[in-house]
Amino acid sequence: MLQDLAAAGSHPLADTAARYVGLLPLLPLAGFLVNGALSLMPAYKAGPADPSTAGHGHEASAHAGDARAGDAHAVTHGDEHGAVGDDHHVVARHKYAGVASVVGPLVLALSFGLAVMIWLAMAGAGEMTTPYVQTFFDWMVTGDLKISWAFQLDQLSMIMVLVITGVGTLIHIFSIGYMRDDPGYPRFFAYLNLFVAFMLVLVLGASYLVLFVGWEGVGLCSYLLIGFWFSEKANADAGKKAFIVNRIGDFGFLIAMFLLFANLGTLDFTSVAAAAPTLGYNSALVTTICLFFFLGCAGKSAQLPLYVWLPDAMAGPTPVSALIHAATMVTAGVYLIARSGVLFAMSPTACITVAVVGTLTALFAATIGLKQWDIKKVLAYSTISQLGYMFMGVGTGAYAAGMFHLITHAFFKALLFLGSGSVIYAMHAAYHHTGSHEDAQDMRNMGGLRKYMPVTFVLMWIATLAIAGVPPFSGFFSKDGILSAVFARAQHGALSEATWLGMPGSAVLYALYGLGLVTAFLTAIYMTRMMLYTFHGPNRTGEAEQAHLHEAPWSMTGPLVVLGVLSAVGGWLNLPVAIPLGPIGVLEKWLEPVVGAATVAVGGAVGEEVTNTEYGLIGAAVAIAILGIVVAVVKLRPAALVPKRDATPSHGFEQVLEDKYYVDEVYDDTIIKPLVSGSRNILWTGIDRGIIDSLFVNGSAVLARGVGWVGSQLQSGETGAYAWAIAIGALAVLGAFTFR
Amino acid sequence: MQDFLVQINYNAWILPALLLIPLAGALVLLVTGSLSSDDGTLEGAPSARMVALLVFVLEFVVSMGLWWSYDPAGSRWQATYDHWWIIPWNARLSLGIDGISLMMVLLTTVIMPLAVLGSWTSIRSKVRSYYALLMVLTTGMLGVFVSRDMLLFYVMWEIMLVPMYFIIGIWGGERRIYASLKFFVYTMAGSLLMLVGILYLWNASSVGGSPATFDYDQLLTIAHTHKAALWLFGAFFLAFAVKVPMFPFHTWLPDAHVEAPTAGSVILAAIMLKMGTYGFLRFAMPLFPSAAMTPWVRTTILTLAVIGIIYGALVAMVQPDFKKLVAYSSVSHLGFVMLGIFALTLQSVQGALMVMISHGISTGALFLLIGMIYERRHTRLIEAYGGIARVVPLFSTLLVIVSLSSIGLPSTNGFVGEFLVLIGSFRTHPFFAFFATTGVIFAAAYLLWAIQRILFNALDKPENEHITDLNARELTMMGVLVAAIFWIGIYPQPILRRMEPSAALFVRTVTTGQANVRTAARGDR
Amino acid sequence: MIAEALFFSAVLFTIGVVGVLTRRNAIIIFMCVELMLNAVNLSFIALSRLHGSANGQVFVLFVMTIAAAEAAVGLAIIISIFRHHKSVDLRNINLLKG
C-alpha cells in the first residue's frame, strides 16, 4: 500500500490509527476468503481426468455422492426457511463450522475495534474540517480521467463505519447460533463477511466510483444471501429480482456519474464539492444529476417505485434481513444523499422530490404493513416505511436528522429482525419436533409467545416503542427530529420559497409533514398489531408444539440485549434543544463539518431558542404514537385469530392491502412479460431469425442459387447448340464493328 | 528483465518468431502424422495434445517478453521487423506492434494454451489435424495483429478463416456444415470488398512516380477525396462489421458459436471477434478519417452499436441454449466496443480496448465452462439443468464469478471497460451513451436468469445428481482466467498505461485527419 | 494476290463453320475444325508475307503442332465415346448439361 503522504501529511489524522483505514474492509475480506475456502474445500475431490468418458457410470460419482448426501438432505430440509435445530435426524453440521464461527465474527470484531480506535483518534483530533484521504493506487487513469483506489475518513463515514461494524458484529454473533446446523455454514459467513467488506468500501470510498464499487458489491452479496437457500425457486427468484431492480437504480447512479464527469471532470468527493458551484444553482443540470442519483438511491433503499425487491428479500436468512435489509445496505441511499449534500443543496427541486418520494413511500409501505401476516413481511414494509422517513429528512436538508434516524433504525430494526429470528427459530424447532409443515413465520400461527420467550418479548417491545416513536426510546427522538425539520423547512428557508411542479414548496412541505404524522400513526398501529398477534393472546401454534417452544440460546439473545439497550438509549445521541436531558445535538455537531453547509443552504440557519411551536410538534408526535398504540390495542382481538390453515380470505380493501396493491403483478404484466415475450417473438424469432437470417442471409443464398439455376438452363449440353451460339455471337460482334 | 531482453536482442526476432513457432509446431504434427500408422484418435495419438500444449506454452512464454520490452511511452510501431516478400508488387513482410496490437497479441497467446486444455479430452478424433489447425490459426491471428503491410494483413486475415472453417466443420455439432459455411461465406463476402479497397489504395499510392506500396504508414498519408474515402470506408466497414459482428451482420455468430467445439468457440469469441474492432481501429478509421467523421456515418454506426447492445442483450435473454445466449451477449459487448471507438474520446477508446480484452477473458471463460459441463451432460440447454450448485460447487462458484465479470460488476474486468466506454462516450454522445447504459440492466437480467436456471432452483432432474465436479486441469485453466478477471478489474493501470499513447494517437489521427481532408473535399466542389 | 489468299481462307473457314454447325457426326465435325484451323493458317501465311515478318509463319508452326496434338487427343476421345455409346452422333451426348 502506498500512502499518499503528500495529501495526508498535514492532516490531523495522519499518524493516528486512521492510517490503517485500509484494514477496515480488508479484515472482513480476509474473513471472506478464509470462509469461502472452507466452504469449497470439501467439494474438491479432483473430478475425473477425462470427463467425456467418466461421469456416466455410477462408480465415478458414488463416492462423491455420499459425501454430499448429508449436505443435500439438510439443505432440502432447511429450505422451508432457515431453520435449524433438527433433533430427529443426524444434522449435517459443516465439517469446518467450528473454524468458520471463529473466523467470521472475529474479523468483524477486529474491524470494529479498529473503527473504535480511529473514532477515538478522530474525536481526539479536535476540529477536523477536511476529510482524511488515503490513496492506495491508481485504478483507471487515462487522459483527464483520474480515478484511484482511495478511502476517505470524515465524520459521516466514521458514523457509518461504527454502525456497520458494530451492528455487524452483533449480527455475526447471533448468526453463530441461528445458522448453527446449516450445511452451508461457512458459505453463509463468507457472504456475510464479503458484504461487510463491500459496505465499508461503500462508506469509505473517496470518490463516487469507489463508492459505486461498494454499492454494487453489497448488491451482489444481497443477491447471494437472499438466494442463500437457492434450492427453492422462490428464494433464487427473490435474489435475482433484488439484483436486477438494484441495477435499474445503478443505471441512474451511472448516468449521474457520467453527467458529473462530463461537466466537472472529476468524481472525487472533495473535487466535486469544490467544483459544484459551476453547475449553477437550481440549474436543470444539477437537478438532473441529483435526480439520477436519487434513482440509484430509490433502487438501493427500496423507495417508490423500486421498492418491490425488499419484501421478497426476506427469503434470505433472518440475520441477513437484519444486517443487510434493515440496518446497513438499504440505508446506503440515505448515506449517498448526505454525502452529495453539496449537490442536493443546489437543487431545491431535487430536494423536494426526494422528500415527496420518501414520504409517499413511508405512507404507502405503512398501509401495506397493516395487513401482512408474515412477521418478516411486516418488518420489511416497516423498513421501507422508515427508509421513507430518512429520505424525508435528507430530502429537506436535515442531514443530521436523517442520519440520526438511520442510526437508531439500525438499532431497533436489527433488534426487531433478530427478535423475529428468535421467534421463527423457536417456531420452526417446535414444528420440526412434531413433523408439522405449518408456516413458522405466519403470525396467525403464533400468539401468546411471551410465556415461552420472555427475553425476546421484552426486547421486542422496547424496539416497538422505539419505532412507534414513544419517548424516551431512540426512535422518538430521531423521528421527531425529521418531522420538526420538515415543519421548519415549510416555514422558512430555500425549500419553502421554491416551487415544485408548480406548487409552492411551503405547501408541499406542510402536506409532507401531515402525511408524516399519519404514517407515524400507522406505524404505531401495525407494530402493535405485530406484537399483539405474536406475543399476546392465546397460543395458536398447536397443542403438541407448545411443549417445544422455548427461548433461543444466549449466543442469540445476547446480541439482542445489547441492541435493546441501544434502542432504548440511542436517542441521547442527538437530543433536541427542547429536551435538555443531556448534551444537546451531539450528532448534529459531529456531522457539522461534513453536512453543515448544505444543511444551512437548504434549511437556512436555525436559531437555538426553543419555541412553543416546537413543544407543540413534540406533543403532537407523542400523542399520535400513543394514540396509534391505543387504537391497535383496543381494536385488535388477538383472541379472535385462527391459525393460518383455518383462516378465511379477507375481502375489499383489506385484500388489496394484503396483496400489496398488486404492484408486483402490475410490473409483471406491464414490464417483464412484454419484455420477455417481445424479445422472444419479435426480436428473436421475428427480426433475428425471420428477417435477418431467413430473408437476408439465407435469402441471398437462395437468390444466388436461383440465378445459377437460370444460367444453368442455358447449358443444354449439346455441343451443336454451343457452336451455333458461338457462330451467331461472332457474326454479331463482326456486325457491330462493321455497322456501328 | 529489460536488460536481459536487450541482451538477447529480443525485439528484433520476437514477432517473426511468434508467427513461426506455431507453424513449426503444425509441421511437426503433420509430419509425425504422415509417418505413423495410427488412426489419429486421442488414444492412437496421445502425444499430439502434449505437443500442442508445449508449443502454445512456449509461444506464451516467449510472447510475455513483449510486456516488458514494450516501451509504454511510445505510440508508434515497436519491435519492428521488415523483410522482402513480393518484390514486383512492393509487398513486404513488415511486422510491428503498438499498444493496441501488444494487448491483442498477449490476449491471443494467453488464450491459446487454455484452448488446448479445453480440447484436452473433448477432441477425440483426428487429433493431430485438429491441433495443427489450431496452430495455423494462431499464426493467422497473430499475423493480423502485427502486420504493417496491407497485403500481408489481408493474407493473414484470409488464412485464419480456413482453419476455423475446418474446426467448425469437422469437430463441430450437428449443424456444423451449415454453420461453417455460413461463417465462411459471410466473412469472405465482407472481406473481398476490402481486398478491392486495398488494391485501390495500392494503386493510389503510386502518385508522383513513387512505386505503389502496401505499406500501412505510407498509405496513411494519402489524402482521398471525400467521395472516394466514403466508398473505401464502406468496403472496409463491411469486412470489419461482419467480423465484429455488428447488428445486423451478426447472425453467423450464434450459429458458429453453437456448432463449434469448445476451443473453437473460445477462440472465436476471445480473439477472432476482436479482429473486426481491431480493423476499425487500425485501418478503417485512420485511413479514411473524413469518412469516419462524416456525421451521418458516425450516427449510423453509433445507432447500430447501441441497437446491438440492447438487442443482443434482449435476444440473449430468451435463448434456450446457453452457448447461444453467450453468443448474443457477445453482440451486446461488442456493441460497447463500437460505441467506444466511434465516440472518439480517449476514455472511450481506451474503454473499447479494455472491453476487447475483458470480453476475451470473460467470454472465453464462459465458453470453457460451458464446454466442461457439456462434456459431462452432453447438453447445453438451460432447462436441462437446475439446482446443480449443490452437486458441483466448484463449477458453480466459477460460473458465478465469470458471469459477474461479464455483467460488469465493479472490481471485475468487465466493469473497467464498460465504464470507460460509457463515461468517455457520454462526453461526445450523451444520447447514445444513455441508451447504452441500459445495457447494464439487461446484462444482469439475462445472465442471472440463466445461471439461476442452471445452478439454482430445485435439483429436480435425476441425471444431474451425479455430475462430477471439476478436475485439476479444469481448475487450473479457470484459475488463470479468474486471476486475470480480478487483476484487470482492480489494477488495470499497467494495461491502460501501455495502450494510452496508441489510443491517443488513434483519436488524434482520426479527428485531425478530418480537418485536412475537409479542406481537400471543399476543393473538390 | 493477298486478296485471293484471304478470300480462299475465308471460304475455307466458312465451310468449316457450316460443317461444324450442321453435321452431327463427331469425325466430320472434327475434320471441319481442322479445316477452320488451316483456313486461319492460310491467312497467317498470307499476312506474314504482306507484312514481311516471320511472326505469322512461326505461329503457323505452332498451330500445326497444336493441331496435331489436338487430333491425337480428340480422336482418342471420339474413339472412347464410340466405345461407350456405340455411336459418334453428338445429339446423344449431352453430358455437359448444367
Image (cartoon, coloured by chain):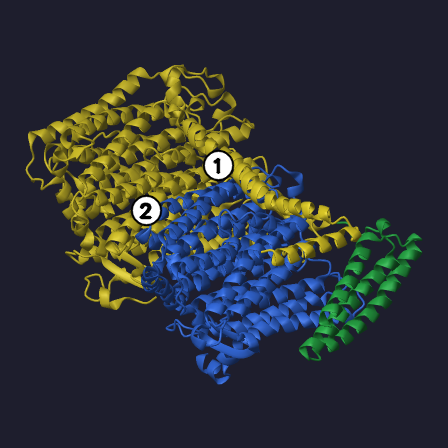
Chain colours: A yellow, B blue, C green
Q: B217 above or below A196?
A: below
Q: Residue type at mark 2: give it.
A: Ile
Q: Is residue A74 left or right of residue A266?
A: right
Q: Nearer the viewer, residue B93 or A214?
A: B93
The residue located at (37%, 34%) in the rendering is: A419
Q: Nearer the viewer, residue B488 or B11?
A: B11
The residue located at (52%, 43%) in the rendering is: B316
* Distance (Cα) linking label 2 and label 1: 27 Å
Q: Secondary structure at mark 2?
A: helix
- Label drawn at residue A237: 1
Other residues around mark 1 within 10 Å, as few (<14) / some (14–19) / many (≥20) = many
Q: Position of residue B323 (x, y in %)?
A: 58, 48
Q: B449 above or below A17?
A: above
Q: A314 above or below B501?
A: above
Q: Chain of mark 1?
A: A
Q: Nearer the viewer, residue A109 or B11?
A: B11
Quickly name the residue at label 2: A255
Q: Chain of mark 2?
A: A
Q: Nearer the viewer, residue A594 or A610?
A: A594
Q: Position of residue A697 (x, y in %)?
A: 58, 46
Q: Position of residue A553 (x, y in %)?
A: 43, 39
- Label drawn at residue A220: none
Mark 2 vs mark 1: same chain? yes
